[in-house]
Image (cartoon, helix red, strand yellow):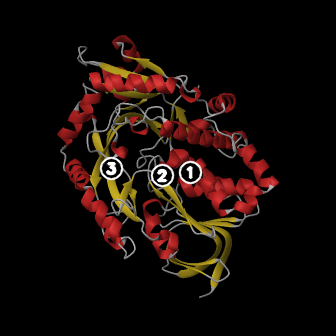
Amino acid sequence: MTIEKKVDVLLVGSGVMSATLASLLSELDSSLNMMMVERLPNVAAESTDAWNNAGTGHAGYCELNYTPENTDGSIDINRALAINASFEMSLQFWSYLVEQKTLPSPKNFINATPHLSFVWGEADVEFLRKRFELLKKHHMFQDMEFSDDIATLKTWMPLIMQNRDESQKVAATRISYGSDVDFGSLTRHFVTHLQTKNNFNLALNTEVKSLKQLSSGRWQVRVKDLISKKLSTVDAGFIFLGAGGGALKLLQKSGIPESHGYGGFPVSGQWLVCNNPEITKHHNSKVYGKAALGAPPMSVPHLDTRIINGKPALLFGPYAGFTTKFLKEGSYLDLIKSVKPNNIKPMLKVGRHNTDLTRYLIGEALQTHGSRVGTLRQFYPHAVKADWHLENAGKRVQIIKKCDVKGGKLEFGTEIVASQDGSIATLLGASPGASVAVQAMVDVIERCFPTQMESNDWQKKMKTIVPSYGQSLIVNADLLKQVRERTLKTLNLL
């Protein structure tokens, strides 16, 4: 077959990960020839789209599942610190692009939205207090506030406190400079700017059919135009599979040894949405609670202010559910087709060890509108059914991998999988996802472009793009103060 396109970098999928990687590489080396292929007719239409994405500014400020309580009663804050540091990298990169006029006014993709954690009952209030005291001591969370005072909580979250029984023991923590991010809008701005460059090509309605590595180390990728049905071949030096739930299938097509043993556990999601301006105007924050017993981490209930395409809305959820589709625009056969001889054992083991989770997800999917609103009323007691409607969120494919102890384990984080020669890479998993895209894609660049990253030129550029690069914000309080002051001001989050 004739090779119709030869590129340095091929990006499969037009979501936030691919767009972030392309933008970083473009800043590091403007001469790179890049191509992005997307099977849908629009950019960022799957998990990155604002209505599909539950991660709208994860910074570790309010997500209680990032600070688990150990069996001895101690609280582990390390993951919250790591996610906060990663989100700060994203804020630095976006600030740089705003300053360079590469991105438009920040209000087009990010808006100041306080982040709160909210709990009720003596045990959970005590947990939240202990969590606050630990986090407050660290410079990354030094601005966190705690209150169990009814009057204060009414000013922080008036809807949630409206008509609430004042004898109920409640508490909340708050970071005033949290944010809401429209990752769909952000990604489309990334791609729009990339399209102004002569050496970037976007192919929509284009699906990858096969991947084959040549003896030279380069890849031949067969792609199909879904409109004309025409097949063509792309010759690529490096491939990034940024296809969200579709990444596992493509990774398996690559045949690299590193893909063996990986499987996927798909989870669907739904939101209750309120667009009534008389209600939305009284809530301007992201309020996270504790997950129900047996619920997966991405099902932590939260009542969110969202600014989507410039319009405010309230979202509550997500309500998880069981699915066999890996993508919202995918096939119900996705799960079955992902089962291979090299991953069937860990997938079966995970299925056997997670029957309670499966029952929970099926139960969630079968809920009535009334029962969903009943859960909402734990957060917002005055909620009226007629003000809320159900919207389907995106699919999340959690990682299944081999495990020496149980034969297979289910992971709820993200993981980069790359070939030994660094010629192909992907990101599997979901949470915290989009919010840490910059950190994740810097990790991909370090693994797959090691020689260039060690050069003085790329090192200097990386420190211009992300001033904290190569240093730890978790350790360096002065550096954190410096970069945070800049990003909060540049992105209008103060």
Mark 3 residue type: Gly
Identify the residue under disc 1. Answer: 187
Residue reaching furthest to the right: 456
Mark 2 residue type: Thr
- Looking at the image, residue 120 lies above or below residue 312: above
Mark 3, Cα crowd under 10 Å, few <14 / some 14-19 / many 20+, is: many
Q: Position of residue 387 (x, y in %)?
A: 27, 34
Identify the residue under disc 3. Answer: 269
Q: Position of residue 117 (x, y in %)?
A: 40, 28
Q: Secondary structure at mark 3?
A: strand
Identify the residue under disc 2. Answer: 48
Q: Residue at x 62, y 30 (%)?
A: 488
Q: Which mark is residue 140?
A: none
Query: In the image shown, does 358 or 280 lie closer to the viewer?
Result: 358
Distance, label 1 to label 3, CA atoms, is 22 Å
First-in-chain label (1 vs 2): 2
